[in-house]
Amino acid sequence: AFCRGRIVRVPRGPLIRVVGTEVAIPCSVSDYDGPSEQNFDWEFSRETDFVRIVSTWDSAFTSEEYQKRVGRGDIKLRRSSNDAVELVIRSIQPADQGRYKCSTPSTDATVQGNYDAEVQVKVISDGLSVSGSKARSSASLRLSEGDSFKLRCSATTTSPEHTHLHVSWQAKSGSSWRDILSLTHEGKFQPGPGYEERYRSGDVRLDTGANDTYRLSVSQASSADGGAYRCLVSEWVRGADGSWQKIQEKSVEIATVSIQRTDVVISTSNVSVTERDSLDLTCNITTDRSGIFQAEVMWYFSASPDDTLSDAQLLLSMDHDSVVSDSTLISLSHVDRNSYRLLVRDVDVEDSGYYFCEAAIWVPLHNGSWHKVVERTSAPVSVVVTALEPDYDVFLNASKTPKFSDDPTELNCRITNVQDTEANLRFSVSWYYRQRLPGDEAVPEELLASMDADWTLLPGDRGRERIQNGEIILSKKSADTFTMRIQWTSEGDRGDYFCVISAWSRHRNNSWVKSKDVTSSSVNIFWATQDYTLTVEAVKLKPFFVAGHTFEMTCKVSSKNIKTPRYSVLITAEKPLADQSGPNGTTRIISLSQDSVVRLEDWTDQTRVDGVVLEKVQENEFRYRMYQTQVSDAGLYRCVVTAWSPGGGGMWREAVNGLSNPIQIDFQTSGPVFNVSVHSDSPTIYQGEVADLLCIVTTEGMLLEPDDMSFDVSWFAVRSFALDREPILLASLDRRGIVSQSRRNGSSDLSLERISPLEFRLRVHGCEDHDFGNHYCVVTPWVRSATGVWQREPDIKAKPIFLSVKMDVLNAFKYPLLIGIGLATVIGLLSCLIGYCSSRWCCKKEVQETRRERRRLMSMEMD
């Protein structure tokens, strides 16, 4: 609106319309201001003056000449959008020919553009005539499926204008009409939806003939082609803008076509026959065709009623010349004009399935050839072939039943009372297990193993692993007896067992098909069991002893309800100090397996590798000895015994565990008391310096000579301000004076030495920032007793001291500063030297004296 202003549009004229038809003249407005919904006024003029017809906003706008027609609805406005309307004249008359003006009241802020538009309407007489065929027989046609038919209609026009006709043939389906084929006003053939393929193949054609006739030809008629047919003709004229406009339309019903469907059915419904009998089926073709025709019949077989012809198996066929394909056991015969019989001799169980026939009707042509006009397929018929089942019984018994766990179990499945057996019959077996629960709760059976027709063993999920390991053995003892043996029966095998004997019959193609299953009664495998009991008693043989003597204890075991048990023994100690290795404070010392194999568990004292002994005294008695006991051996000692019973395959199965009463080792000593502390004169040092840490041992109580005591010293560090990390071993010094250091990643070094009988010094050379942290020592005292035996005392941990490492700023910058000053001095001297050399040799100039010429001076006047 800002650029062009309001624009009112109507179609370009003249608009040619046929008298008596409905006329709709559109009018729209664009590029306007104000409300979105615009109002319109329509006026009419035959010559000069305009007469008001109708308005969208003023009911008093209509002139007296048009009030009646507007009131009856013969003339009205139909709004298509907010900015467009249509002037609708229901039945236009010659008096309505003239100029029509559409105007819009202004809603713009400024007056711009056009506010009205005119269009010329020309009314012509109705010259279109449409008629059908004059023959009465064409009003109703009764045809057979596959026949052809033709329909004719005539259409002419005497319009004074240059108009074109659009002819369409339509068929009525239900209450609506569908297009078959059209000849458009532009001279093009246009098939309707669903008729494109038939138009391309020539089965549906539209031909023009003399006297303006239009003929519809339909070949290969089907049941869908039945119904009423009409000829629809519309008249078109090209408008001033070059587009085609439909000005009127007429139709006439030509004929009603009925198509007699050809059906193919099988005379019998579902059939049940016995094996070795004959199957007799008849295919009937229902048609009202009276002329010459021949039928082509094909019989099919499928395992499913939903299979298509491509998936089904062709059994036998007869073409329209009555030539039958060859087959030994199947025959196809022509019973009468419309019936064809299929006979299958000596049926087998494999012949069970669905049978259906397909029939095609062929008719002769004028040139002597045959043409297929229709093809139908019957509904499938279910055929069930009942096998000749053998008659036999199955008996299951247990020849061996277990009394205890791991005893063998043997079951025999026998076939008895076999009657009416044939040479082409064999038996196989399937073994099942069902757990027996208290009450009436249903438990599904589990397949242990089965055999197929070739007697191939097929293990089930429950028995697969045990069959592969040889724990379950399946065999056939005789022609009528199958055996299952469980080598070692466990408590999980208790339950019901039964067998299923399957009979297999050999068919014509030498394949084996299962014909019958007979299930035996179940056999229950059960034995009474009692809970295992195990009692362990520990006895201390020497009630009083001192450090250095031998500790000795025995473990006596008694058990109940365990078959031929063997025992494994483990000696444990519960110590009150930090040398406990188990998660619950228990140290595992030595064990003896059920096969009498001795093993050291967590015994780590290398000086006393042979200091502990565990031996079997009797089948149920075991003795533990510990030589040269130390004070650190104090604690509670127990026997952990496991009872084992023989399992499958020569293996041992754990039955039950038992724990003995504790035996305490407690030493009453009056020796000295040791204390340990850590000291440093300078706990805060700078990088690169040496840190000295002293581990000082003090004694209280009884005094000892220095030669009667020795110490193991270990230094640890925790790299944090708080003791919240794992300690790191730095170095250790044993009582023999051997120093051991842990591996280090930094450049600093360690040294550990004994500087007095009770003082040990740790030095950290060239300290770095990662050497900070809490440092402490752990001391293990060793005291020589009066008998000359060295006794180990409990470990003593000192209170940690924090070592802080700082950076020496002066020393850190001393060497870089000296290096910088030296480099600057050298560069300055080198620059002076280069400057001097350049001025001395490269920039020297030679001064030449100019020769004076001997000339006289000229006078000023001459100059």
Image (tube, helix red, strand yellow):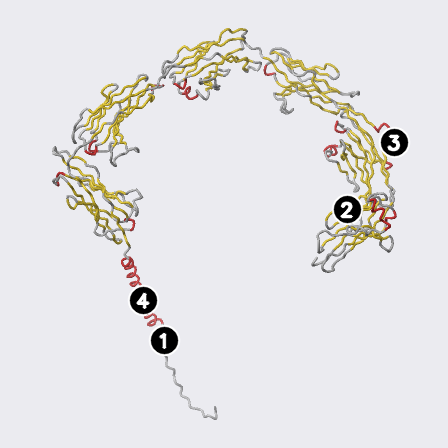
Tell which tag, 3 or 2, sits nearer the viewer.
2
Query: Image height check: is 258 above or below 182?
Result: above
The numbered mark at residue 556 is none
- CA–CA distance in space, label 4 to label 1: 27 Å
Instruction: Indicate the position of residue 341 as horizontal and vertical percent values.
Output: 69, 15
Residue under label 3: 134
Q: Residues within 10 Å of mark 2 (few under 14, many from 20)?
A: some
Residue under label 4: 828
Tell which tag, 4 or 1, sits nearer the viewer.
4
The tag earlier along the polypeptide, 1 or 2, is 2
Do the residues bearing badges 2 and 4 touch, measured as CB atoms within 8 Å? no
Q: Quadrant of residue 299?
A: top right
Q: Amino acid at mark 2?
A: Arg
The tag earlier along the polypeptide, 3 or 4, is 3
- CA–CA distance in space, label 1 to label 2: 112 Å
Q: Amino acid at mark 4?
A: Gly
Q: Amino acid at mark 1?
A: Lys
Query: Image height check: is 153 above or below 271?
Result: below
The tag earlier along the polypeptide, 1 or 3, is 3
Residue under label 1: 845
Could you say whether the residue bearing mark 4 is in a helix, strand or loop? helix
Instruction: Indicate the position of residue 55 as horizontal and vertical percent values.
Output: 79, 51
The tag earlier along the polypeptide, 3 or 2, is 2
- CA–CA distance in space, label 3 to label 2: 43 Å
- CA–CA distance in space, label 3 to label 4: 130 Å
Could you say whether the residue bearing mark 2 is in a helix, strand or loop? strand
Q: Amino acid at mark 3?
A: Lys
Could you say whether the residue bearing mark 3 is in a helix, strand or loop? loop
Image side of residue 718 versus residue 88, left or right: left
Q: Residues within 10 Å of mark 1 (few under 14, many from 20)?
A: few
Image side of residue 211 versus residue 188, left or right: right
Residue under label 2: 78
